[in-house]
Image (cartoon, rainbow, N blue to C red):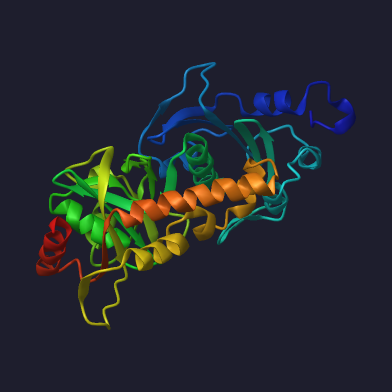
Amino acid sequence: MTLSAPAMTNTIDEILEQQVGYCDARVVDLGVTRVLIRANVPNFSGFRYFSRMRRAQPGERAPYELYCIDLDHEHSLDEAVVASYADTSFRGKRFTGGFYLTYHFGAPASLITRGNRHYIAGRNLDRIIWGWYTKYILTVHSFSAGSLHLKAACFAVDGDGTLLVARGSGGKTVLLAQVCQDGATFISNTHSIVDRERIAHGVPTTLRVREDACFGPLVRSRKLQPHLDQDEYIADPALLFPRSGSSARVRNVCIVDYRPEAASAITTLSSAAAYDMFEQFGFPINTYGMKDDVLEFCHGDAEEFLAVYGNAKQQLRELVNGAHCLYVNADMLNPKERARLMKALRH
């Protein structure tokens, strides 16, 4: 029986919860927090972006919860009715038009928020989970905990942590992979959470790789799952790196800018220059365009938003000012260049 507005006797929350059931429910470990994700489809593909999770127990709860309802699967919902309950926030309205975040577009979806729980009803929900939800939860959780969420990879050498930030296709993932295959300790690929003690905590997600000189053999031999974008694949870091850890104290910050047409360079960078690059390419509010989400998190209060944003920028500035900053334009597939970088990091 299709649900229509006059026939509704339960609340929309109860109806959506009944729809999702426990067809596939898992607790995803994000390092600094946990997310319970429930879906109305078996073997939900949205889980492929996370590297640590377990099956959820009936009735289990978590600090954050996401209920995914794929409208192409069996359901008894009137889409128009569900849409009428969608959030009227900036992000909620964008979802109804098929725009999620940055360059992530897809089918229109309804986002319904209830405290720490989000319901999403739509199609091809992978793009929403990876494109918006993961970034959003890490950002608001960090603000709540007084930590700093960064779009940055992290590895450790002799216990000292190094953060990597780069423009798109700037060589961050190749550098990370090569040094970790050479013995560095892998901490995180895409997201790092830095606390007030300058400890970078890794977020366990899978690695996005391309079929290139660095990852081609792995792509072909492992038959990896495709990522959201064409010619990109997903790999569990455990398949790639012999050593991994959960955190490291930040000693180095590297701005990675691989341009093979330019002269190789591994040079000291001023903290001011490193901060400017980090703010634009590694700071989620700017990098992902999340200012409206953060304003919503601040209850629409501009003064609260400015205080939260200003505090985060100050934390970032203090982090960079206290680090050894490097500019790196070098071919990390070259063992000599890797050795040169490792020497600079230990300086």
What percent of the width, then of the height, locates residue 331?
Answer: 20, 71
Left of 283 or right of it: where is 305?
right
Left of 268 or right of it: where is 130?
right
What percent of the width, then of the height, locates residue 26?
Answer: 46, 28
Left of 140 or right of it: where is 246?
left
Res. 226 visible in picture: no
The relative height of residue 270 versus residue 293 in the rendered view (above or below) is: below
What percent of the width, then of the height, locates residue 29?
Answer: 40, 32
Q: Residue furthest right?
A: 6
In the rendered picture of this protein, how many numbered marks are placed on residues?
Answer: 0
Image quadrant occupied by the C terminus:
bottom left
Left of 109 or right of it: where is 247?
left
Choose between 81 and 140: the one closer to the eye.
140
Choose between 86 and 214: the one closer to the eye.
86
Q: Residue at x 44, y 46 (%)?
A: 149
Choose between 215 and 219: the one closer to the eye.
215
Image quadrant occupied by the N terminus:
top right
Choose between 227 and 221: the one closer to the eye.
227
Res. 267 visible in picture: yes
What percent of the width, then of the height, locates residue 116?
Answer: 60, 31
Q: Residue at x 34, y 68 (%)?
A: 170
